[in-house]
Image (spheres, helix red, strand yellow):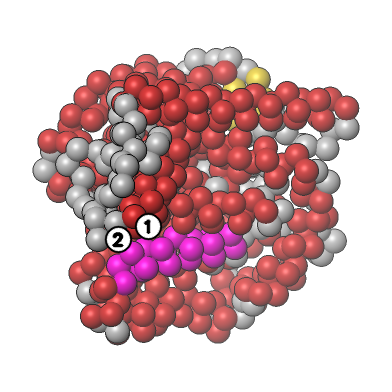
């Protein structure tokens, strides 16, 4: 048998650059095509396609902090991620991610960047006073979804199950009133999503890959839309649901399984689209299937937890399926019924590039190469750990355990599949830089496969800083 010679590191780097370049061309094409469509027919309903944003170069009070965090993370992030004790790495990642999100939000100032975001006419805080009687509001929730219904809900309230609005109602009830507290909640909770992803990677793949992914999760361009979008909060709930499922199957713990099910059920009542997180959860369960075989009680515990939130809302009078049916109608009544599917079905992917960065495009190329390598290895040497090296397929990063790279690649691909299903559904036309945060965060770990992390982290930071300082984003 003739073995294919391994691909040189320089050739792999070139291919990474080609992948990043293709992603950049996709963004450029979406900008040019979107600008033409908006100038001629004005059917996109965004000022700077494909993003919901407008051109407005500016600086703000958060600019120095954002630049400082970016420089420090690029310079020291990879080394600290490799050397810090695991228990210290997790809070460090959370804290740094939180400062990165806050500093980017404060580029627009406290009022516009944080306090006002969740109080605009489409947002949840506009209807707090209509939930004085929570049981009555839940029973009558579906009656206000359609545009022609009396006292119809604002767009975001109608577009989500009531757990989203109830979160801010409960914050108001305990004295954390107004947009400032609501925005702070979304930033603080949303920043924990990177910790959840790290926990899941360590449990399902290995610690070395989690450590390599950590700086990319912290310095994600998605931070532009995590401060202070409610979708950052949704993304964190969904991420912890997956992380708990990973802990459940690797530690054979019914408690973690029940917690995963509970959060997965909550996620589905925060956003209809988060039902697709079940694909990522399923991937985690498959990757830990040995734990399922050894503890058959785990699926039952997960399902028991999953039933809690739907049961409570159903008993309170809210019908999830009826609400979703009405939402589909409402979506067609508004801009969603006018925005052209033929443009957004691919321009949405350009939004994903802008929220995950060019490094993620290169990382996804490497993840695909990992899958090819293992398929080739399985076909030629079923019992080999890595097998012969097909052209273009890099070896696993140094320090990565056997088959850990394959496990991470599978987890990333599950997230990509969820994102593509959301895209093809036609229920995510535009604004996906925000809506797809729960899926985008799971693409970022593909950057763990990259060599020269400082180079790619620099690209990530520059993208986030440029978007936040050149555009006035809608979220």
Secondary element under disc 1, as helix, strand or loop, is helix
SS majority, magenta? helix
Q: Which residue is at a point 70% across and 45% down the rendered structure image?
A: 345
Residue 340 screen position, x and y as percent: 80, 43
The one nearer the camera, 317 or 30, is 30
* Left or right position of 460 against 51: left
Q: Is residue 279 magenta?
A: yes
Give the residue pinned by disc 1: 379
* Quadrant assignment, res 213: top left
Residue 228 screen position, x and y as percent: 49, 40
Residue 182 screen position, x and y as percent: 47, 47
In the rendered structure, find residue 73 and report the number of the disc placed on it.
Answer: none
Q: Which residue is at a point 34% across and 55% down the rendered structure image?
A: 380
Q: Which residue is at a point 37% across and 57% down the rendered structure image?
A: 379
Q: Please, is residue 13 above or below residue 88 in the view?
A: above
Badge 1, how many Cα within 10 Å: few under 14, some, many 20+?
A: few
The one nearer the camera, 137 or 145, is 145
Q: Outermost residue toward the right?
A: 41
* Left or right position of 272 against 443: right
In the rendered structure, find residue 382 and report the number of the disc placed on it.
Answer: 2
Highlighted range, magenta: 271-289
Q: Is residue 219 visible?
A: yes
Q: Please, is residue 257 above or below residue 412 in the view?
A: below
Q: Which residue is at a point 30% across and 61% down the rendered structure image?
A: 382
Secondary element under disc 2, as helix, strand or loop, is loop
* Quadrant assignment, res 72: top left
Q: Please, is residue 58 above or below residue 168 in the view?
A: above
């Amino acid at each position: 048998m003739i073995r294919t010679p391994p691909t040189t590191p320089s050739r792999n780097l070139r291919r990474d650059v080609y992948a990043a370049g293709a992603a950049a061309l996709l963004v450029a094409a979406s900008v040019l095509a979107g600008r033409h469509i908006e100038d001629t027919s004005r059917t996109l309903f965004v000022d700077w396609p494909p993003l919901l944003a407008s051109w407005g170069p500016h600086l703000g009070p958060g600019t120095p902090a954002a630049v400082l965090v970016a420089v420090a993370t690029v310079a020291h992030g990879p080394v600290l991620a490799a050397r810090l004790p695991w228990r210290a790495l997790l809070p460090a990642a959370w804290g740094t991610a939180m400062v990165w999100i806050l500093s980017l939000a404060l580029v627009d100032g406290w009022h516009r960047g944080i306090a006002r975001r969740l109080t605009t006419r489409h947002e949840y805080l506009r209807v707090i006073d209509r939930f004085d009687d929570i049981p009555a509001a839940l029973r009558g929730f579906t009656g206000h979804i359609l545009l022609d219904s009396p006292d119809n809900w604002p767009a975001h309230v109608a577009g989500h199950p009531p757990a989203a609005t109830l979160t801010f109602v409960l914050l108001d009830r305990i004295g954390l009133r107004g947009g400032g507290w609501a925005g702070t909640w979304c930033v603080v909770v949303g920043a924990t999503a990177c910790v959840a992803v790290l926990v899941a990677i360590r449990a399902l793949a290995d610690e070395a890959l989690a450590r390599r992914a950590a700086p990319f999760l912290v310095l994600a361009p998605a931070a532009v839309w995590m401060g202070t979008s409610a979708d950052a909060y949704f993304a964190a709930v969904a991420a912890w649901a997956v992380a708990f499922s990973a802990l459940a199957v690797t530690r054979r713990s019914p408690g973690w399984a029940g917690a995963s099910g509970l959060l997965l059920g909550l996620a589905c009542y925060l956003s209809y689209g988060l039902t697709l997180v079940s694909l990522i959860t399923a991937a985690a369960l498959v990757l830990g299937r040995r734990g399922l075989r050894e503890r058959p009680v785990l699926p039952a515990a997960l399902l028991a937890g999953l039933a809690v939130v739907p049961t409570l809302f159903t008993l309170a009078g809210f019908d999830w399926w009826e609400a979703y049916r009405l939402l589909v109608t409402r979506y067609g009544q508004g801009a969603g019924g006018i925005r052209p599917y033929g443009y957004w079905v691919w321009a949405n992917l350009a939004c994903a590039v802008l929220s995950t960065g060019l490094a993620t495009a290169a990382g996804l190329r490497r993840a695909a190469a990992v899958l090819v390598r293992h398929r080739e290895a399985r076909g030629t040497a079923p019992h080999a750990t890595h097998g012969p090296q097909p052209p273009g397929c890099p070896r696993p990063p140094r320090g990565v355990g056997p088959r850990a790279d394959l496990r991470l690649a599978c987890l990333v691909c599950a997230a990509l599949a969820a994102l593509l299903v959301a895209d093809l559904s036609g229920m995510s036309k535009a604004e996906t830089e925000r809506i797809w945060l729960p899926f985008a965060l799971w693409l970022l770990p593909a950057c763990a496969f990259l060599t020269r992390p400082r180079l790619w982290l620099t690209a990530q930071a520059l993208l986030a800083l440029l978007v936040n300082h050149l555009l006035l984003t809608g979220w």
